[in-house]
Amino acid sequence: MSKYLAVALVLLFAVSAAGKKKPKGPDPVLCAIKTVFVAGNNSAADWIRSEWQRGTNIAVVNSAEQADAILEVNESSVPVETYGRATQAEAAINVILRDKSRKQLWADSVSSNNLVILHFRKKAACDVKWMQ
């Protein structure tokens, strides 16, 4: 009987340990980024460029050659239907962060400029400061 109890306790412990999620650590690739070039000729890219330059510890540079990573920003309008009629357009902002070899490091699709920065901070989970 004690043999079965011991096996049951070992299995219970193993299942319990496997079920616990380890806290996610910082993404070392994203944390290594110190400079970024924001590519895009739209209002979302302009906003991101000015806000990152003003309030983060990731410097925005003027050329892709100077940057550790390139943030491609595309903005489009998506019609919003109200009562079966398209009444307004909502912005859709798509961003892709690539390293110098053009490998995709991170991507996001949001409806607000603020969310781009917030989602990046959450994904990177490193010491990316954001001062408002």
Image: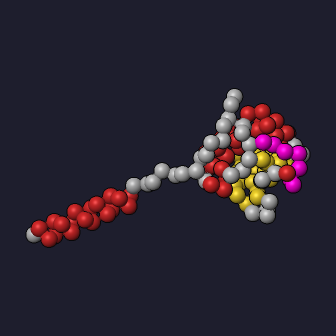
Residue most extreme to the top: 132
Q: Is residue 88 magenta?
A: no
Query: Which residue is depicted at the point 73% across and 60% down?
Result: 104
Question: Where does the magenta region start and end?
Answer: 59-65
Residue 89 falls in which quadrant of the image?
top right
> Residue at the spot x=54%, y=51% of the render?
25
Specify the quadrant that holds the N terminus. Answer: bottom left
| Residue 61 position in % (x across, y down) | 84, 45
Q: Quadrant of the C terminus?
A: top right
The answer to whether residue 131 is left or right of residue 16 is right
Does residue 116 appear left or right of residue 75 in this picture? left
Q: Nearer the viewer, residue 46 or 54?
A: 54
Query: Taking 20 as reference, is 100 left or right?
Result: right
Q: Residue at x 77, y 53 (%)?
A: 69
Name the residue located 74 percent from the left edge and 43 percent from the top edge: 58
Can you give x and y, in whole percent of width and height, for residue 60 in the image? 81, 43
Whether residue 90 is visible, yes or no, is no
Colour scheme shown: secondary structure
